[in-house]
Image (cartoon, coloured by chain):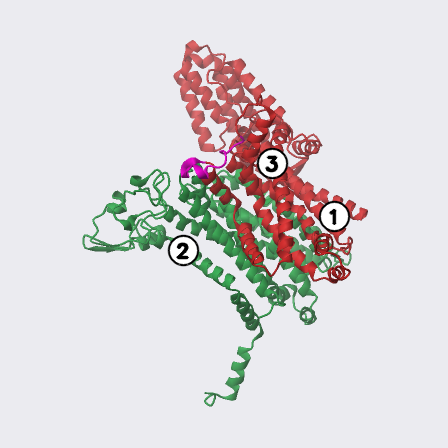
């Protein structure tokens, strides 16, 4: 019923409906969802993601809800409060294992085991079809157990969380580095980054001194802080020193730039430098670099695996962003923005990057897949494992120790395979959907 | 063309330099100290000095008794000769003391006085109190690895009490102990903290660890293994044989199957076979090799699941003695290599086949294929002679990353099937803290990758003359 609306409102609505960016993305979305395989892959991925996110509610030895001696508890929720330091457990929960309380009412999670719960009655690799010693089918180990009687299904749920975390965090780090270098190389190219002589000189000197005073002189303090656990404070002090020295150098440069000779601009071939760095990174096989770095870490953990994968795997993203920005840079609207006198960073952030970001999504999808695979390989090899964690790769590696345990070979591997494959399908689907030549 | 290749090779040098710096830098961050030889528990003066010589000769063997790099950027408080202290934990400790007080002169006096005490302790006859001597000697060793003020003062007090409880020591080590105390007080009194803030550059010249490492790397000398004392080169040579053998077999297998399969699929695009093959190849392509390998080991090498699944021999390479007839050994090895080679090849097979199909589909639509058909060539000649040659180009360029990817892929396959190749060598080296092997392999892998990239560029420009060499 358009009668009630003023003409002004009508026009506004029409304009909003036909806004260009939303139309572009909706078209991409439409194309993507037309691909049935990609659509279902995305749905499965969301399910895995949700399993990872709500792992505590799916597989836990603690009840979701229980009533003991007339008191009501929500142990799974309470665990979060305890972890945050907001609450503490009653002593009885310390003293008695969760399975041995006299519950009046009880609701257990779908899998009534945590990934660390040791069911000693069912230790030594019980298969799903073996005669398991469990109180009821509710407590059946549907995917079998490992050597110590830990439930494989619970481990798989926990593994989903680790896999998702590895994929997301490592690609987040990789995206930040990759986009930064890609923008540098693609937007400035070889001949658009001009700085005055004195600024270059002062910055080189500044980097030297900030390294010396920020890290060299403070290396003892930093190392001690690393042992005492105050590394964050000392590191931020160091970074502050670096910041101050570089700031001083640039202020000095601004003053001295009044001199004619010193202020002569020189061009820095940013693109060549960026491409060199990418080439160097690409020349070192990722797995070997990862192995070498993990070898020197004294306490490797899942976090360090994520960070290192992120630090290694950014080159693909950087290349995509660079290529896209090289293309966009020569378009008219960037020229127009320049003619209007906008600053470089504003053009990059507001006009360049948003249009270059689409193809990055493809690399990120493939990147998550390869990060998950790399992490699985590492934990399969037993490198970078924290004792209390469980990953798919680790579960799979147990099958090598006991070849009778087919369930340990089958299920974790299947999880890795499915996750990696659907991510690859999503990547393929995105490639097609973002290609303007493909039909709607 | 020639110019282009020369230019590319020149580009190599800085890249390789940076990679070698990275690998060397990482190798310097490794935990543990290869020079450190634990002292035998029952030691006398000569064994004490012997152990120092031992450490020296070990360091010499591994080339660790040289300065680390061409130059060092430190502050004025640090002497340029600190690298001569061979044991890592002691070196770090003196470094820490300098970082706190900034006066190396005093610290080195303190250091000498500790050593004097340790030597003097051997002069005390055991009859005067073996346990007390042992205690003092242990405490004095702690002094060499302590930099925290409180801890040092505590240790000094402890030594003094032991000393006071054994008055018979008085004439022998009394002077040394008071020397240590005085020298430590001197360190604290005469601290020159300002020197810590004056940057200095020490130039060490070309006889340094990095220079020796990188120059000998290029003549094939990768250092000495920490565990076996064999040259790393010969260990890698033994291992690379197996990796190379599996790699070549896998490559031949995958290309032999993939190219006909891809061509056939493309030629018969309308057949159900093509649809089936496409799906199968996609699944093969995304199956993680280490999962498939584990499944194969679990199901096909053990009799757990009935004798009909126990088709292949177990992991490893069999254990026939080298005296066995050649053909027996050959068949034994061949049987053991079937599964690993299959696992190494199927991924690539699927990938090449997909590429081949895509390339062929593009080529078949070209005008010159129609021309070839029009001039009456047989279908086989059209496809295999005109079509294949032109769609092979992207496949040839795939050769580029064969070396690195196979090297990386073989790590896990070798571990699963227990084959003594490069990957297994690396992993074993990591678990044994045998770092010369780890970083030699890292460098070899990097050089192989760079050669692969160069090869790809050259092949690419050969296959498509439109690729320009000047502008990239």
Which residue is more in the foreground, B196 or A214?
A: A214
Residue ID for mark 3: B243
Q: Earlier in the sequence, mark 3 or mark 1?
A: 3
Q: Chain of mark 3?
A: B
Q: Position of residue A409 (x, y in %)?
A: 44, 43
Residue B316 lies within the magenta run: yes
The magenta stretch spans which residues? B302-317
Residue at (44% x, 11% y) in the render:
B126
Residue B64 lies within the magenta run: no
Q: Chain of mark 2?
A: A
Q: Mark 3, residues whose alpha carbon is within 10 Å: few (<14), some, or many (≥20)? A: many
Q: Which dot marks residue A51?
A: 2
Q: Position of residue B290 (x, y in %)?
A: 51, 43
Q: Which chain is red?
A: B
- Front tag of 3 and 1: 3
- Front tag of 2 and 1: 1
Residue ID for mark 1: B458
Colour in which chain A is drawn: green
Find out whether the residues at labels 2 and 3 contact each other: C-beta distance under 8 Å. Answer: no
Cα separation, mark 2 vs mark 3, equals: 40 Å
Asked if residue A373 is positioned above or below residue A46 in the image, the reply reads: above
* Element class at badge 3: helix
* Element class at badge 1: helix
Q: Main secondary structure of the magenta part?
A: loop
Which residue is more in the foreground, B26 or A365?
A: A365
């Amino acid at each position: 019923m358009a009668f009630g609306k003023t003409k002004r409102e009508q026009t506004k609505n029409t304009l909003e409906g036909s806004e260009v960016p939303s139309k572009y993305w909706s078209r991409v979305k439409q194309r993507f969802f037309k691909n049935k395989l990609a659509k279902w892959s995305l749905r499965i991925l969301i399910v895995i993601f949700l399993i990872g996110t709500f792992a505590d509610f799916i597989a836990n030895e603690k009840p979701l809800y229980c009533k003991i001696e007339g008191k009501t508890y929500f142990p799974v929720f309470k665990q979060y409060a305890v972890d945050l330091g907001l609450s503490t457990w009653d002593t009885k929960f310390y003293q008695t294992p969760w399975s041995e309380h006299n519950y009046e009412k009880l609701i257990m999670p779908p899998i009534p085991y945590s990934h660390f719960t040791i069911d000693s009655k069912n230790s030594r690799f019980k298969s799903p079809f073996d005669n398991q010693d469990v109180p009821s089918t509710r407590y059946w180990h549907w995917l079998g157990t490992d050597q110590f009687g830990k439930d494989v299904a619970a481990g798989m749920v926990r593994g989903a969380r680790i896999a998702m975390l590895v994929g997301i965090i490592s690609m987040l780090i990789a995206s930040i580095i990759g986009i930064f270098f890609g923008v540098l190389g693609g937007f400035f190219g070889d001949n658009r980054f001009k700085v005055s002589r004195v600024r270059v000189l002062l910055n080189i000197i500044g980097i030297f001194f900030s390294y010396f005073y920020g890290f060299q002189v403070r290396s003892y303090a930093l190392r001690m802080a690393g042992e005492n656990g105050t590394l964050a404070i000392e590191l931020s002090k160091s970074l502050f020193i670096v910041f101050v020295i570089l700031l001083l150098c640039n202020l000095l440069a601004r003053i001295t730039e009044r001199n004619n000779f010193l202020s002569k601009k020189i061009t820095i071939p940013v693109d060549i430098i960026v491409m060199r760095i990418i080439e160097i990174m690409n020349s070192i096989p990722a797995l070997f670099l990862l192995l070498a770095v993990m070898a020197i870490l004294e306490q490797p953990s899942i976090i360090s695996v994520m960070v290192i994968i992120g630090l290694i795997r950014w080159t693909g993203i950087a290349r995509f962003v660079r290529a896209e920005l090289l293309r966009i840079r020569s378009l008219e609207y960037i020229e127009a923005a320049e003619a209007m006198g906008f600053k470089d960073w504003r053009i990059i952030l507001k006009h360049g990057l948003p249009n270059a970001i689409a193809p990055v999504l493809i690399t990120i999808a493939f990147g998550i897949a390869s990060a998950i695979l790399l992490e699985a390989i590492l934990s399969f090899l037993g490198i970078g494992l924290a004792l209390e964690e469980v990953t798919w790769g680790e579960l799979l590696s147990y099958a090598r120790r006991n070849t009778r345990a087919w369930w340990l070979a089958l299920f974790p591997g299947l999880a890795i395979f499915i996750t990696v494959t659907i991510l690859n399908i999503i990547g393929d689907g995105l490639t097609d959907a973002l290609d303007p030549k493909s039909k709607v | 063309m020639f110019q282009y290749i020369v230019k590319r090779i020149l580009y190599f040098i800085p890249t390789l330099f940076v990679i070698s710096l990275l690998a060397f830098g990482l190798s310097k961050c490794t935990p543990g100290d290869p020079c450190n030889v634990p002292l035998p528990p029952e030691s006398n003066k000569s064994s004490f000095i012997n152990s120092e010589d031992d450490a020296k000769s070990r360091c010499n063997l591994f080339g660790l008794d040289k300065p680390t790099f061409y130059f060092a950027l430190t502050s004025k408080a640090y002497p340029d000769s600190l690298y001569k202290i061979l044991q890592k934990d002691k070196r770090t400790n003196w470094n820490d003391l300098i970082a706190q007080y900034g006066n190396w002169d005093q610290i080195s006096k303190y250091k000498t006085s500790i050593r004097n005490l340790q030597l003097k302790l051997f002069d005390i006859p055991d009859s005067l109190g073996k346990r007390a001597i042992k205690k003092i000697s242990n405490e004095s060793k702690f002094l060499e690895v302590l930099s925290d003020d409180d801890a040092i003062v505590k240790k000094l007090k402890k030594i003094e009490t032991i000393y006071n409880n054994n008055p018979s020591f008085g004439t022998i080590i009394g002077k040394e102990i008071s020397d240590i105390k005085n020298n430590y007080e001197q360190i604290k009194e005469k601290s020159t903290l300002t020197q810590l803030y004056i940057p200095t550059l020490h130039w060490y010249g070309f006889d340094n660890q990095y220079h020796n490492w990188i120059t000998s790397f290029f003549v094939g000398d990768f250092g000495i293994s920490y565990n076996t004392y064999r040259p790393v080169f010969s260990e890698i040579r033994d291992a690379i044989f197996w990796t190379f053998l599996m790699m070549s077999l896998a490559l031949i297998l995958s290309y032999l199957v993939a190219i006909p399969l891809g061509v056939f699929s493309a030629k018969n695009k309308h057949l159900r076979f093509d649809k089936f093959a496409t799906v199968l190849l996609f699944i093969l392509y995304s199956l993680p090799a280490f999962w498939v390998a584990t499944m194969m080991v679990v199901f096909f090498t053990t009799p757990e699941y009935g004798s009909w699944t126990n088709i292949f021999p177990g992991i490893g390479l069999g254990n026939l003695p080298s005296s066995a007839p050649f053909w027996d050994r050959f068949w034994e090895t061949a049987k053991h290599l079937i599964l690993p080679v299959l696992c190494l090849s199927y991924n690539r097979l699927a990938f090449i086949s997909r590429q081949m199909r895509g390339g062929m589909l593009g080529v078949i639509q070209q005008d010159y294929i129609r021309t070839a058909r029009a001039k009456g060539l047989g279908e086989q000649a059209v496809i295999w002679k005109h079509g294949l040659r032109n769609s092979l180009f992207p496949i040839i360029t795939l050769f580029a990353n064969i070396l690195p990817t196979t090297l990386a892929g073989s790590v896990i396959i070798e571990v699963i099937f227990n084959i003594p190749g490069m990957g297994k060598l690396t992993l074993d080296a990591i678990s044994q803290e045998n770092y010369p092997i780890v970083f030699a392999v890292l460098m070899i892998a990097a050089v192989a990758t760079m050669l692969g990239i160069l090869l790809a560029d050259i092949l690419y420009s050969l296959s498509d003359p439109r690729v320009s060499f000047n502008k990239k």
